[in-house]
């Protein structure tokens, strides 16, 4: 039986595996070219891990504005609804392959909510 997410280390494993999928996808790589070419991937993974650690374990380590970061990126690389669908799909696949339980469920629910809010704020949301 798979464990539930129980630590920052588990979250980092999810985010690292998730980014392996994103970076291998031709539709998603344009959003990460700068991070990869500037050798900032590990730093980026740590920041995203902090973000999810705050959400799942009620810590206070992430200090950026996640929405603003995506709005800023959207100026250079346009987000489409399909990008959010791919993002959610890869994250869920990564979580479901490795974890099961309340925290895993919470992470998926929050990811879906975050994607929906971003789509709304970028004018991409359509039922």
Image (cartoon, rainbow, N blue to C red):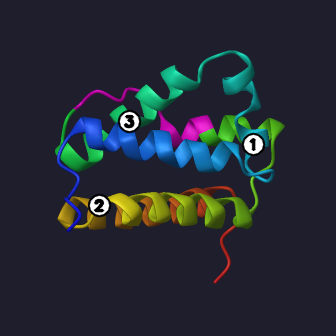
Is 72 left or right of 6, judged from the image as shown? right
Foreground label between 3 and 2 = 2
Taking the spot 52% from the left edge, 48% from the top edge, the residue there is: 18
Q: Which residue is mark 1?
A: 29
As drawn, which residue projects farthest toward the bottom?
127
Query: Where is mark 2, residue-wise?
Result: 99
Sequence-first disc among 2 and 1: 1
Q: Which residues are magenta?
A: 60-69
Q: Residue at x 62, y 41 (%)?
A: 70
Q: Nearer the viewer, mark 2 or mark 1?
A: 2
Q: Is residue 71 above or below residue 112?
A: above
Prevalent SS, magenta region: loop
**Callouts 2 and 1 close, C-beta under 8 Å:** no
Figure quadrant of residue 51: top left
Where is residue 28 drawn, in percent x and y? 73, 49
Q: Which residue is mark 3?
A: 49
State the CA–CA distance, disc 1 to disc 3: 19 Å
Find out whether the residues at labels 1 and 3 contact each other: C-beta distance under 8 Å. no
Dot 1 or dot 3: first in sequence order is 1
């Amino acid at each position: 039986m798979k464990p539930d997410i129980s630590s920052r280390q588990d979250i980092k494993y999810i985010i690292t595996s998730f980014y392996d999928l994103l970076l291998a996808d031709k539709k998603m790589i344009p959003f990460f070219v700068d991070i990869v070419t500037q050798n900032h991937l590990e730093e980026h993974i740590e920041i995203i891990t902090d973000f999810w650690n705050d959400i799942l374990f009620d810590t206070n380590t992430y200090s950026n504005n996640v929405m603003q970061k995506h709005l800023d990126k959207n100026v250079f690389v346009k987000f489409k609804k399909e990008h959010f669908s791919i993002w959610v799909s890869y994250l869920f696949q990564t979580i479901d392959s490795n974890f099961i339980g309340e925290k895993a469920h919470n992470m998926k629910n929050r990811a879906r909510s975050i994607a929906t809010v971003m789509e709304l704020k970028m004018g991409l949301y359509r039922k």
